[in-house]
Image (spheres, helix red, strand yellow):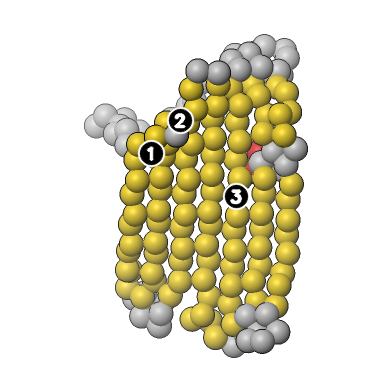
Amino acid sequence: MPIRNPGVDTTEPRPLPEPAASGEAARKTKVRSGSMERSVHTDLTNGKVTHKFFLDGGVFGPVGDFRLDDIGTVLSDVSDRRYTILPGDPLSAVATMEQTAGFDREDWAARIWTYSEQQATATEFHLISRLKAWSGEELIFEEENAHVIPRNGM
């Protein structure tokens, strides 16, 4: 993380440079159509309710894959978020998010996969996170973390 020098006013955010004015938007080409799903499912055998938000296009909206024509890079981003709970049992709630981002060009490819999960007991929050990164087909990084955080009355 960057650290500001002592004596610098940290009460105001640092000004960011303005992007260069180009007059035209970056050229891009749709490579694959995306999709979006928002749904609520109730399991009639046990009453568990699952809210799902799936977005093929990730933070870009349901756009699928697109190529930045000026640099020839294809971007992809798929996000799947699920929130489950048994009505009447707040401690049964589980939130998960799985996301994959890809960056492909003629001579290289990179992909990142992340997963996070949160649930709670009466006294603790339980968090799990997983990360994998690939260069081409080679897995180059993998990490899993689990944290237990006291609720301290929350």
Callout 1: 10 Å neighbours few (<14), some, many (20+)? few
User: Gap between marks 3 and 2, in whole Å?
Assistant: 21 Å
Residue 127 against residue 154 in the figure, above or below: above
Residue of label 1: 139
Quadrant where the C terminus is found in the figure: bottom left
CA–CA distance in space, label 1 to label 3:
20 Å
Closer to us: 18 or 33: 33
**Is there a contact, CB below 8 Å, between mark 3 and mark 2?**
no
Q: Amino acid at mark 3?
A: Ser
Mark nearer the N terminus (3 vs 2): 3
Q: From what the image shows, is residue 70 above or below residue 120?
A: above
Spot occupied by residue 142 in the image (x, y as percentages of width and height): 35, 46
Vertical side of 121 occupied by 94: above or below: above
| Nearest-to-viewer mark from 3 and 2 | 2
Nearest to the observer: residue 54 or residue 10: 54
Q: x, y percentage for residue 82?
A: 59, 63
Residue at image coords 54%, 35%: 102
Q: Quadrant of residue 151?
A: bottom left
| Left or right: residue 154 compared with residue 31 | left
Is residue 109 found left or right of 4 in the rendered image?
Answer: right
Residue to which mark 2 is pinned: 136
Residue named by callout 3: 79
The residue under label 1 is which amino acid type?
A: Leu
Q: Nearer the viewer, residue 153 or 141?
A: 141
Residue 95 spot, x, y in % from top left: 53, 66
